[in-house]
Amino acid sequence: MLTPLPANLEILHDRDALIIRRKWFSVFAFFLALFTLIWNGFMVVWMTIALKNGAWPMAAFGSIHAMVGIFLAYFCVASFVNKTDISIDPNYLKVRHYPLPWRGAKKLRVHEIQQLYCKEHIHRSKNGMNISYHLLAITNNRREQKLLSGLQEASQAQFIEREIENILGLKDIPVAGEHRK
């Protein structure tokens, strides 16, 4: 079955490997950039006042929030420039995030992968609800391995699942807790 390529995905061929590349960029990155600028601007003012006045407890308290600001800035830049490559060759399925390092890199032997499936992740907070999708693999020893997380569209997760299953010759078998197609 021919499936249209979802936004932010592309398919590449490299020697004996197929690569599914996902660009992290979305409109959300602009909102994140604005929020990060406001957050870090406030923290610069906070820390300047605290350090000028010798208010060490205020500076210590602010340093926790400053670290959050540093992480936000890193994540913001990653949201604009990062990509994830899922490469499938005759021996391995590899997940790599770049150019900025990010957690979640994986390397699984293809013969150990028994099934792939998508899972919906709902995060509720006082500000509302956020839905994202994960792509998971079940290995021969029945262990669950998270391959991708934070996908904003079910179509991306499902497309990647189908492509990998087709390449590896896996039959799509329903899994408990799977996001229904």
Image: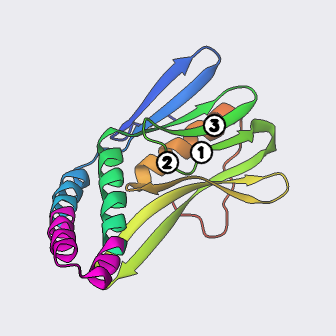
Amino acid under disc 1: Ala
Quick check: can you spot residue 84?
A: yes
102 w.r.t. 122: above or below? above
Is 54 a magenta residue? yes
The label nearer to you, 1 versus 3, is: 1
Identified at 36% across, 46% down, the residue is 78
Query: In this rendering, would 127 be left or right of 6?
Result: left
Quick check: can you spot residue 2?
A: no
Magenta segment, principal secondary structure?
helix
Estimate the spatial distance between the alpha carbons at disc 1 and disc 3, rounded to whole Å: 7 Å
Which circle marks residue 102 in the picture?
2
Q: Position of residue 51 (x, y in %)?
A: 22, 72
Identified at 65% across, 31% down, the residue is 167
Q: Position of residue 145 (x, y in %)?
A: 68, 55
Query: In this rendering, would 155 be left or right of 32?
Result: right
Mark 3 surroundings within 10 Å by alpha-carbon count, few (fewer than 14), some (14 through 19), many (20 or more): some
Q: Which residues are magenta?
A: 39-63
Query: In this rendering, would 94 be left or right of 6?
Result: right
- The quarter holding residue 143 reads bottom right
Which circle marks residue 94 in the picture?
3
Identified at 42% across, 50% down, the residue is 155
Q: Which residue position is annotated with label 1?
A: 105
Determine contact: label 1, label 3, CB under 8 Å: yes
Amino acid under disc 3: Lys
Q: Position of residue 83 (x, y in %)?
A: 42, 38
The answer to which of 180 and 134 lies nearer the viewer is: 134
Q: Position of residue 158 (x, y in %)?
A: 50, 49
Estimate the spatial distance between the alpha carbons at disc 1 and disc 2, rounded to whole Å: 8 Å
